[in-house]
Image: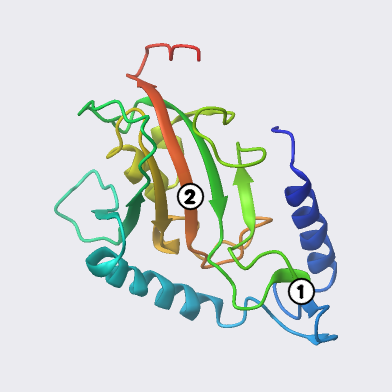
Amino acid sequence: MKRKTLKQLKAIIYVLLLTLGGGWVGVSCSEDKGTTNVYENWQARNDAFVASLEDSLNHGVGTWKKFKGYSKNPQTGGDYIYVQVVPTGNESGQTTSPTYNDSVRVSYEGRLMPTAIPLNGKGYYDGSIFDTTVYGNYDPKTNATARFKVSGLVNGFATALMHMHRGDTWIVYIPYSLGYGGAEDKTLIPPYSTLIYKMTLYDFAVEGATLPKM
């Protein structure tokens, strides 16, 4: 288990209090002393957020991309992930990408969709962090990393990796249909949540091979 940041510990305490209070509804907002649910109409709001990414794809600043969620049958329909490429100067210039059965070494920071009302009255306008390898500012040169099998990840995360090259840093927007869907057993992730990952691919190895140490 990775060491938790202070922000994550606060988020865990928040979720424990929330669970004792009855799930993902009736969140108390300290600013107005009333009862405000920051996840009200969460599914519809996430749907609208993902739909708005089409505008970013067509008119957004920087390089945006769109990829259909991975399927063993590429002819079948499916939802898309949206990607914003982050230039870092660390790109390798290579053209090969991991496949579904490969292992990868990555760093990442996963957030929820931004909320109009900050959780507990402060601190989460950018969307709360639910998982990360990053401690402090995101820096591909110093981030801690994790190793995964691509096939063991949610579809949207796996899809992004299978289009990345060594050294790439992307911000990846994953609709809940390619994430955890309506699952209610994810402690820091409400049902129907868009997953937003800032992620860097450092290396990958084919099935059966060992990933080089960093």
Q: Secondary structure at mark 1?
A: helix
The amino acid type, in three-letter code, at marker 2 is Tyr
Write down the quadrant of residue 59 in the picture: bottom left
**Coloring applied to the structure:** rainbow
Q: Is residue 149 above or below residue 121?
A: above
How far from the left and from the top, in percent, is residue 7?
74, 51
How far from the left and from the top, in percent, is residue 67?
25, 53
Q: Secondary structure at mark 2?
A: strand
Q: Disc 2 vs disc 1: Cβ atoms closer than 8 Å? A: no
- Residue found at x 23% / y 43%: 72
How far from the left and from the top, in percent, is residue 22?
79, 74
Mark 2 or mark 1: name the one nearer the start of the chain.
Answer: 1
In this view, the mark in front (2 or 1): 1
Check the picture and name the quadrant holding the N terminus.
Answer: top right
In the rendering, which numbered label is found on residue 121? 1
CA gap between label 2 and label 1 equals 24 Å
In the rendering, which numbered label is found on residue 46? none
- Residue found at x 38% / y 69%: 50
The amino acid type, in three-letter code, at marker 1 is Gly
The residue pinned by badge 2 equals 197
- Local packing at callout 1 (Cα closer than 10 Å; few below 14, some 14-19, many 20+) is some
Write down the quadrant of residue 96 in the picture: top left
Residue 32 visible, this orientation: yes
- Residue found at x 79% / y 86%: 35
Does 11 sit left or right of 157 as displayed? right
How far from the left and from the top, in percent, is residue 85?
33, 47
Does 140 sit left or right of 131 as displayed? left
